[in-house]
Image (tube, rainbow, N blue to C red):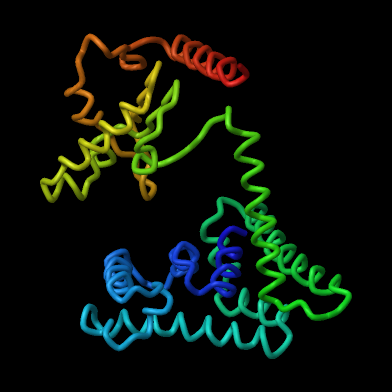
Amino acid sequence: VKDLMSYFRLLVNPDDDNAFLRVINVPRREIGSTTLEKLGNYATARKISMYAACDEIGLGELMDSRFTDRLSRFKHYMDNLRQQCAQHDPIAALRSMVMDIDYETWVRSQTSSDKAADFRMSNVWFLIDALKNTLERDEEGEMTIEEAIAKLVLRDMLERQQEEEEGAEGVQMMTLHASKGLEFPYVFIMGVEEEILPHRSSIEADTIEEERRLAYVGITRARQNLAMTFAAKRKQYGEIIECMPSRFLDELPPEDLEWEGQEDAPVEVKAARGNDALAAMRAMLKR
């Protein structure tokens, strides 16, 4: 539903770069990060939105025509959709959009089960029905689809803000990049393994210094307690692979580390220790 809301936001405000970035590859349009970076730099230099820059002739000087064609096709599709919403039945146009982009197939490819995919798609149709109801409740019949979407987006923003305020004391998940400048009493960093942190691409390019700085950012977010985890084994593409702890762990002061789970303890002992740790976390979150 967040993806669909971003499509709606882009219809109402083509200058919304955040909405543009969220939907440009939903579903996949083979527009990679390098292309988007070049598009962003071009748009910044021209002082226009990324959406507006998609079909500018000057963009062809920065990238191959394959990529400019993909960007241009996306913009023209959204422009036509905006025009259909203004001139014809807007609800029918939005329903057609969901079908045109084969959104359901994309949802099913991103979901773990058919039941979860069905639930997500039911929310999609519910969202469009909510727009329809908003338009039908307009007694004067003068509300445009853009105004109805804007009202829905505002309501969604207010609900998210309320959820964030109510859950301020709960678990907050974020990337290491997004954590910069923040601090928390307890921090858990998952996947502290070679080829994850540092990432495989950085290892291959011999450019892990940035990854080291990123790990330092995460470590220094913790005020009281820091827990870092790594897997002994992972399953990738049906194959079990052995994992190695991150080299960054070896660079930390040994006296400040307390290792768990590496000793050859019985399974029952490890399970009991894990249950104790989970109980401690639950008790901590209830405070």
User: In percent of the image, x 49 and y 67: which residue is there?
Assistant: 16
Q: Quadrant of residue 127?
A: bottom right
Farthest residue to the front: give it.
Answer: 47
Question: In the figure, 117 relative to 43: above or below?
Answer: above
Give coordinates of residue 223: x percent, y percent.
39, 20
Give coordinates of residue 176: x percent, y percent.
35, 39
Give coordinates of residue 245: x percent, y percent.
25, 28
Please tell me which residue lies in front, 98 or 209: 209
Left or right: 201 as drawn, with respect to 192? left
Farthest residue to the left: give it.
Answer: 206
Could you tell me how many numbered marks the image carries? 0
User: In percent of the image, x 18 and y 47: which residue is there?
Assistant: 202
Left or right: 104 as drawn, with respect to 237? right
Identify the image quadrant of the C terminus.
top right
Give coordinates of residue 136: x percent, y percent.
84, 74
Question: In the figure, 195 relative to 270: above or below?
Answer: below
Left or right: 223 as drawn, with respect to 90? left
User: In percent of the image, x 65 and y 80: which residue is there?
Assistant: 96
Please tell me which residue lies in front, 269 or 106: 106
User: In percent of the image, x 72 and y 70: which residue is there?
Assistant: 148
Identify the image quadrant of the N terminus.
bottom right
